[in-house]
Amino acid sequence: MKSLQIFSGNAHRSLAEEICQYLGIELGRANTTRFPDGEFNFQILENVRGGDVFIVQSTCPPVDSHLMELLIMIDAFRRSSADRITAVIPYYGYARGDKKDRPRIPISARLVANLITTAGANRVLAVDLHAPQIQGFFDIPVDHLFAAPVMIDYFDNNPIEDLVVVAPDPGGAERARAYAKRLNADFAIVDKRRDKSQPGHSEAEVMHVVGNVEGRNALIVDDMVDTAGTLTKVAEALHKKGALKILTSCVHAVLSGNAIERICNSPLERVITTNSMPPKEECAPSRFEYLSIAPLLAEAIKSIHEESSVSRLFI
């Protein structure tokens, strides 16, 4: 069997190290510095010929910089005769650009998929893609993991009484309903209207809550929180409807701009998220809790390497 080798860029080295620790192997040696002009200076410092290489690199902010790092690393491993190159992308940047819903805009998620494939990746391992159809943008195999088992395990060990699981929009109903079923909780949904007429506008106006939340503890379930504009407005709507304790579970905590300040000034008591990208230093442990997806990714990497089924990790 070809050797298993795991490497990391600069996006989230600690996650790669945690994956390696779980698997009992050393993180691959490589130079990941920058030239004086800011260009990525990458060099592999060990033999990878014929190896089964996994590159752990979230394309999290700064997205363009980390994406370029990933492409350069893939190219380097391809030119170094690695037998197979798997891009492990816990957070897939540009995932929200998955369709042409306004005139004269790109489908950025497809472009990124093309770049990764052209660079030389043979396979992609991703976690909670914003839109499942992104898998179809690739002409190479994609293993799409979900962090739901990690989240569900957390709430099983930290049960919330009289719980109602809330979808922040109709698009997230399927995800929230699955959580509600696994947690034996009721389900509610928030109807909102997003204003897309302004370039770069990413917030939404909450309309009304569908479902009974009065006197209940609410868990808002979503795949990511970016500016926290939508999230905090949903929390405020639930609070006005009489919800007691309000928490949120999100896989990717992007937390752009003044998102942390918004959350701290909102009715949200706690944010449960994952380490798909590096935790922000400003996130107080009393308000933000990060769950590790390293074991989930490590098990997936092990299954891919051993050519066994990855579906056992799905929920």
Image (cartoon, helix red, strand yellow):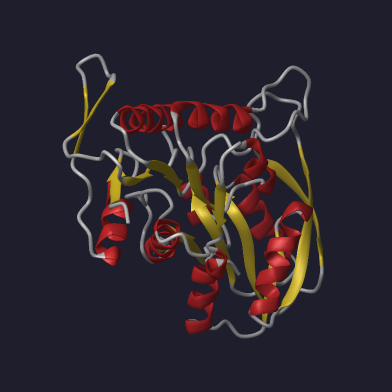
Instruction: Quadrant for the C terminus, please.
Output: bottom right
Camera-nearest residue between 61 and 4: 4
Q: Residue 259's x, y, as percent? A: 50, 45
Instruction: Quadrant for the N terminus, please.
Output: bottom left
Q: Residue 291's x, y, as percent? A: 42, 65
Instruction: Return the residue found at the far front.
Output: 1
Image check: 311 left or right of 184? left
Camera-nearest residue between 177 and 142: 142
* Circle count: 0
Question: Which residue: 51% across, 31% down?
Answer: 117
Question: Which residue: 28% across, 31% down?
Answer: 80
Question: Which residue: 82% across, 70% down?
Answer: 211
- Whether 239 is drawn above or below 45: the answer is below
Q: Is residue 15 visible?
A: yes
- Whether 206 is drawn above or below 286: the answer is above
Q: In which quarter of the image is residue 119?
A: top left
Image check: 20 left or right of 245? left
Question: Which residue: 59% across, 39% down?
Answer: 95
Q: In which quarter of the image is residue 40?
A: top left
Image check: 146 left or right of 290? right
Instruction: Return the residue found at the far top.
Output: 37
- Whether 197 is drawn above or below 245: the answer is above
Q: Residue 56's x, y, as percent? A: 36, 46
Q: Residue 67's x, y, as percent? A: 43, 31
- Whether 128 is drawn above or below 254: the answer is below
